Image (cartoon, grey):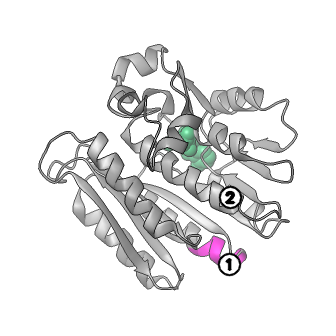
Amino acid sequence: MNYRHAFHAGNFADCMKHALLVWLLRALARKPAGFRVLDTHAGIGRYDLGSSEAQRTGEWRQGIGRLQGVTEGPLADYVALAGGGETYPGSPALAAGLLREQDRLALVELHEEDHATLRALFRRDGRVAVHRRDAWEALRALTPFPEKRGLVLMDPPFEQPGEYERLTDAIAEVSRRARGLVQAAWYPIKGRAPVRAFHTALAEGGVKDIVAAELHLRDPIDAARLNGCGLVVVNPPFGFEEAARTILAELADMLSTGEAGGGWALTRIADE
Ligand code: SAM
């Protein structure tokens, strides 16, 4: 396990994933009944943008760094929650910030040190449980939810071959175990072919109601680079597609590198 999110926190990929995550969590909170969030690859929860890791890559400067000061429009809610300061919230801190008394958050992180950091961050919040276990095993152990509603976020580091296939299988497994849950799965766009194959496998896998939201920095010609990223959403709440279009368009505009092929896409992969 070499991947450490501290090098990448607040980059364009985090902005896309987290802006859409905030919208999805707000949608779940429209109903008074409690919901649960399962974050299967949680990371350390909150990141110091002044750390040597963050300073070394400087990736956040082309991500959240460019959004600071946004107070209106489709990104305003996310940017306000992300804060304009010295730290950047990971998915656990963002989700915890949106929980109500009746909601619960289960965090899974396999890396020993990162798990310890994460556990320490939430030790005083009784609504949050932190687990050190394998994400794919945790999906089976921790679903279905007692609340019967909520969201599963899968955000693997894609440092090993087979991650697209594991995501496809995990989405099918969660659908079988807990059909109504919202699922959000992040994926990198390096080359075109693996993404096409991933979408096809999802479309043919039998899970209904899937959309893919994508942010493109440039044409994916050089597959050694992170040229864009996507979030597959299963069972998107009412209004997601319209909201995602405005969020993605704003992100594409504000985070543009000016290179050919920059932009965004929202694709329906499986019908309701
Ligand atoms: N979701 C986080 C966020 O948005 O702030 C970032 C997560 S980061 C991309 C991926 C994390 O998954 C890393 O912290 C890594 O240690 C962890 N990880 C990698 N393989 C795992 C596995 N099999 N089970 C659980 N966690 C894993």
Quarter of the rendered structure image containing ligand 1? top right
Q: Nearer the viewer, residue 140 or 147?
A: 147
Residue 176 is one of the magenta-drawn residues: yes
Residue at disc 1, secondary structure:
loop
- Specify few, some or many for label 1: CA neighbours under 10 Å numbering under 14, 14-19, or 20 or more: some
Q: Nearer the viewer, residue 158 or 192?
A: 192
Q: Nearer the viewer, residue 127 or 20?
A: 20
Q: Is residue 74 left or right of residue 184?
A: left
Q: Is residue 268 left or right of residue 173?
A: left
* Viewer-side label of 1, 2: 1
Name which residue lies at 16% across and 48% down.
222
Q: Which label sits on residue 179? A: 1
Alpha carbon separation for disc pair 1 and 2: 18 Å
Residue 235 is one of the magenta-drawn residues: no
Type of amino acid at the residue the image marks with label 2: Glu
Residue 142 position by quadrant? bottom right
Give the magenta range: 172-177
Up the image or down, 228 lies above or below 34; here it is above
- Specify few, some or many for label 2: CA neighbours under 10 Å numbering under 14, 14-19, or 20 or more: few
Q: Which label sits on residue 137? A: 2
Up the image or down, 35 lies above or below 124; here it is below
